[in-house]
Amino acid sequence: MKPDKEYPLIKAEAEMFTPEPASNGESKSSESMVEIEDLYKAFEGKQVLEGVSCRIPAGKISVVMGPSGTGKSVLLRHVVGLLYPDQGDVRVAGKSVPSLNEDELLELRRNVGMLFQDGALFSSMNLYDNVAFPLRQHTHKSEVQIKEIVMQRLEEVGLMDAVKKMPNELSGGMRKRAGFARALVLEPELLLFDEPDSGLDPVRTALLCDLIKQIQQKYKSTGVVISHDIKSCFNIGDHIILLHGGKVVDQGSKEELQRSQNPFTQQFIKGAIEGPLGME
């Protein structure tokens, strides 16, 4: 069993934001990009995930939602091997993540772009250099080529006028968009968003979610979004996974969840007071 580990932030940033370009010979249209089977995880005796099984369809946006503390972010970290399961399996593009060696794990991470809640920018680099970092570290592109790519990504996220600013000069929403641009520079097949709407007002939340949808459709990538915002979940999600108590309570298309007869599902998506979810 591999030991649990949280990588130092700068190493995790470098790995998570530096995906390799997708192979021209591989299709993105397979049925599932991610398959999670009977996943268990506990911390200091507290069970967080308790037999989670779900799938992430390729080429679509899946939203993982549920009450706070129900294991959504923990689930996401298993997908990229930042945590290892106590039991069960996580497969990405058919490969069992817990079975990968360090080199194979690094290769997997290079094909994943991840946006953390705060954007996770390098504080010592300006915006341009933050977005250019993956290209300089993992490609042999010239600075002219890098500039073309970086400026295109910054234009896509609406940050063309902020290239020289340092992270501490950016608003929370700008930092998230900057992290998004950096996650995109090598066109990963899998994009993971850990509560991208955290700390944003409703208007900026809607704008960011619309941007995620636009970018996913443009690059035909697979997206996984963790969010508490029900409206955003149903606006951008093609596939919804609802967690509670460390288990999958419901999953399916947004239309299927809206029609679900599960009392917890209906209470959660409607924000109702009455139902199985209380102030626990």
Image (cartoon, rainbow, N blue to C red):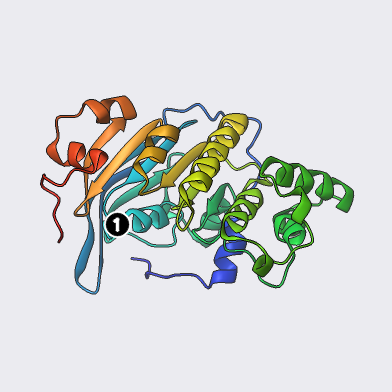
Q: Residue at 51% x, 58% y: name it.
A: 116
Position of the N terminus by quadrant: bottom left
Asked if residue 98 can be seen in this view, the reply is no
Q: Residue at 18% x, 41% y: name it.
A: 267
Indicate left or right for 255 with 126 as reference. Answer: left
Residue 22 position in % (x across, y down):
63, 38
How many circles with numbers are drawn on the protein?
Answer: 1
Q: Residue at 61% x, 60% y: name it.
A: 171
Residue 15 position in % (x across, y down):
59, 60
Residue placed under numbered mark 1 in the picture: 71
Asked if residue 165 can be seen in this view, the reply is yes
Depth check: 208 or 77 in front?
Answer: 208
Density class for disc 1 (Cα within 10 Å; few <14, some 14-19, many ≥20) is: many
Q: Residue at 31% x, 59% y: name it.
A: 85
Residue 68 versus residue 11 in the image, above or below: above
Residue 216 versus residue 3 in the image, above or below: above
Depth check: 175 or 1 in front?
Answer: 175
Q: Look at the numbered disc 1 and give the secondary structure of its residue.
A: loop
Identify the image quadrant of residue 131: bottom right
Indicate left or right for 32 with 122 as reference. Answer: left
Depth check: 157 or 52 in front?
Answer: 157
Residue 231 position in % (x across, y down):
38, 38
Indicate left or right for 179 with 264 as reference. Answer: right
Residue 101 position in % (x across, y down):
48, 59
Position of the C terminus by quadrant: bottom left
Identify the image quadrant of residue 170: bottom right
Indicate left or right for 76 with 157 as reference. Answer: left
Q: Amino acid at mark 1?
A: Gly
